[in-house]
Image (cartoon, rainbow, N blue to C red):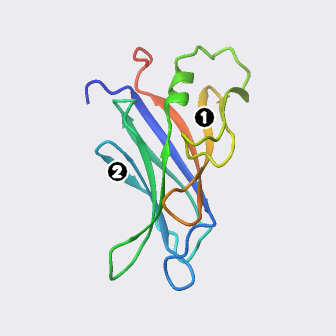
Amino acid sequence: MENMLGLLKFRVRKGFNLAIRDTRSSDPYVVIAMGQQKLKTRVVSNNCNPEWNDELTHCVADPDLPVILTVFDKDTFTGDDRMGDAEIDIKPYLECLKKHLESLPTGTIISKIQPSEKNCLAEESCIVWKDGTIIQDMRLRLRNVECGEVEVQLEWKNLSASKSL
């Protein structure tokens, strides 16, 4: 990938009140898709409040590509059931990467994004300068499902010091 901007690490932390798709529970896992790239977490069996703490890293070449997070219920004998999806808006995060923040103290909040009809945020999301990198924690409300939220953290990895957004 010649025009790759960098790597975006998604820490898929946990799910909250996910939909029941089996008799009493679900066996959820998360797929994060960006363009042709699709990565998935491990399956957490029999749990509607799973903790994955998995890291999925995507190559970012086109910052305008939507990032779609989809939760599925793993089934053994039939196709996996969809348990909702959310679009992750990475543009505010990428805008913060363009700022020169090296002199800021760790823990400084760079930007706050409010939940709106245009995003899937369940609560305010802060973009923070922490230990020499920019992170964003977000809690996403799943769409196309009766209930459920997923907690994710973004972190950027530059490929080289010379290449920037």
- Along the line of sight, the residue nearer the viewer: 5 or 90: 90
Q: Crowding at label 2, few (<14), some or many (≥20) Cα neighbours within 10 Å? A: some
- Along the line of sight, the residue nearer the viewer: 67 or 158: 67
Residue 75: % across, % down: 39, 77
- Along the line of sight, the residue nearer the viewer: 154 or 67: 67
Q: Disc 1 versus disc 2: distance between alpha carbons?
A: 21 Å
Q: Residue furthest front?
A: 117
Residue 137: % across, % down: 63, 42
Total number of numbered labels?
2
Residue at 63% over, 17% down: 101
Question: Where 18 sits versus 152, above or below?
Answer: below
Question: Where 90 sits versus 54, above or below?
Answer: above
Q: Residue furthest left?
A: 2
Mark closest to the chain's N terminus, 1 or 2 = 2
Amino acid type for the residue under numbered disc 1: Ile
Residue located beneath label 1 in the image: 135
Q: Residue furthest bottom?
A: 23
Amino acid type for the residue under numbered disc 2: Lys
Question: Where 80 sits versus 164, above or below?
Answer: below
Residue 165: % across, % down: 43, 19
Regarding mark 2 in the picture, which secondary structure is present there? strand
Residue located beneath label 2 in the image: 38
